[in-house]
Amino acid sequence: MEDSRVLGYGSGDNSDNQQQPGRRIYDPYKDLQIPYRAIYDLPTSPEFLFQEESLAQRRSWGENLTYFTGIGYLSGAVGGASVGLYKGLRSAEPGETVKLRISRVLNSSGQDGRRFGNRLGVIGLLYAGTESGLVAVRGSDDWINSVVAGLGTGAFFKAANGPRSAAIAGAIGGLMVGAAMAGKQVLKRYVPV
């Protein structure tokens, strides 16, 4: 193994090295007069362009809508495509050509992916809108807004199926968000970052 100072990656002190012909020893930090670790030990806190951005503790309502709708659609599309892939492979019949099997799998994956993606995207849109509205009305951002938004999202999503279905879906939505909030608090408390 060669000495790192000979290769030019050392501390810049080349008094004990002899310069070899055809090899140039270069130390980019020699003229800076600062330790090289200060350059590579970058801060881990978020950096903001404007001071107002650093004061915001949560996403804006527009960012919330975009985030939850996008995450909902993407996860629904992936899950639905997986279900469609399974159904398409399972429904293959003996004697079919490979081209027909591939077409069946692609059609089934696309159909289920769109359907699941659209449903979860709408649920994300309803949740983000409800939660942002509650934050604006109540003037505080806490777990109550999230749980009530989950209740409202379930009720709004199933409102067309009748009041009983809306109440059940609202309860399920509230319980799911409540469990997610409790899990988040447990992770904050017991899992080191």
Image (cartoon, rainbow, N blue to C red):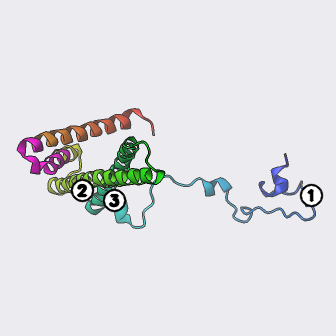
**Marks 2,3: beta carbons within 8 A:** no
Q: CA distance from mark 2 to mark 3?
A: 25 Å
Q: Is residue 158 magenta?
A: yes
From what the image shows, is residue 60 above or below residue 119?
below
Residue at 6% from the left image edge and 45% from the top image edge? 163
The location of residue 182, given as percent across then percent down, is 28, 36
Foreground mark, 2 or 3? 2
Q: Residue at x 83, y 62 (%)?
A: 25
Instruction: Determine if residue 163 is in view.
Output: yes
- Is residue 115 within the magenta segment? no
**Residue on which disc 1 sits:** 18
Q: How many marks?
A: 3
Q: Which residue is mark 3?
A: 55
Q: Earlier in the sequence, mark 2 or mark 3?
A: 3
Magenta range is 149-166
Q: Position of residue 6 (x, y in %)?
A: 85, 55
Q: Amino acid at mark 3?
A: Leu
Residue at the disc numbered 2: 125
